[in-house]
Image: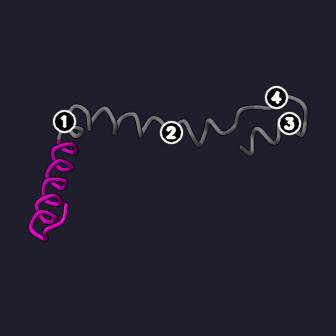
């Protein structure tokens, strides 16, 4: 956002310096995402969510609600 405001205030495109901040973090996030996908994290997360939902429904059923 700061880079965009600087460009607008100068009415010219200036050197895209945010890449030095966003670039390394982007690379780390991509590596972490690929690692998580290769270990099956989305499936584990979905199983954990389904288990939580089942426990919630069981508690509601025991209480006489829902």
Q: Which residue is mark 2?
A: 24
Q: CA distance from mark 2 to mark 3?
A: 26 Å
Q: CA distance from mark 4 to mark 3?
A: 8 Å
Q: Which residue is mark 3?
A: 8
Which residue is nearer to you in this view: 62 or 43? 62
Which callout, 3 or 1, points at the residue further toward the start of the chain?
3
Would you say the residues marked 4 and 2 are in contact, meaning their CB atoms lie under 8 Å apart? Answer: no
Q: Element at badge 4?
A: loop
Circle 2 residues within 10 Å: few <14, some 14–19, many ≥20: few
Would you say the residues marked 4 and 3 are in contact, meaning their CB atoms lie under 8 Å apart? Answer: no
Q: Which residue is mark 4?
A: 13
Would you say the residues marked 4 and 1 are in contact, meaning their CB atoms lie under 8 Å apart? Answer: no
Which residue is nearer to you in this view: 62 or 48? 62
Which callout, 1 or 2, points at the residue further toward the start of the chain?
2
Circle 1 residues within 10 Å: few <14, some 14–19, many ≥20: few
Q: Which residues are magenta?
A: 44-66
Q: Element at badge 1?
A: loop
User: Which residue is located at x 75 percent, y 40 percent?
Assistant: 3
User: Which residue is located at x 21 percent, y 49 percent?
Assistant: 49
On screen, residue 17 above or below 49: above
What's the mark number on residue 40?
Answer: 1
* The stretch drawn in magenta includes residue 57: yes
Q: Nearer the viewer, mark 2 or mark 3?
A: 3
> Is 17 placed left or right of 41 in the picture?
right
Q: CA distance from mark 3 to mark 1?
A: 44 Å
Q: CA distance from mark 4 to mark 2?
A: 22 Å
């Amino acid at each position: 956002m700061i880079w965009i405001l600087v460009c607008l205030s100068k009415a010219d495109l200036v050197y895209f310096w945010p890449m030095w901040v966003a670039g390394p973090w982007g690379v780390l996030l991509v590596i972490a995402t690929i690692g998580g996908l290769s270990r099956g994290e989305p499936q584990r997360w979905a199983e954990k969510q389904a288990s939580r939902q089942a426990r919630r429904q069981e508690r509601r059923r025991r209480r006489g609600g829902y």
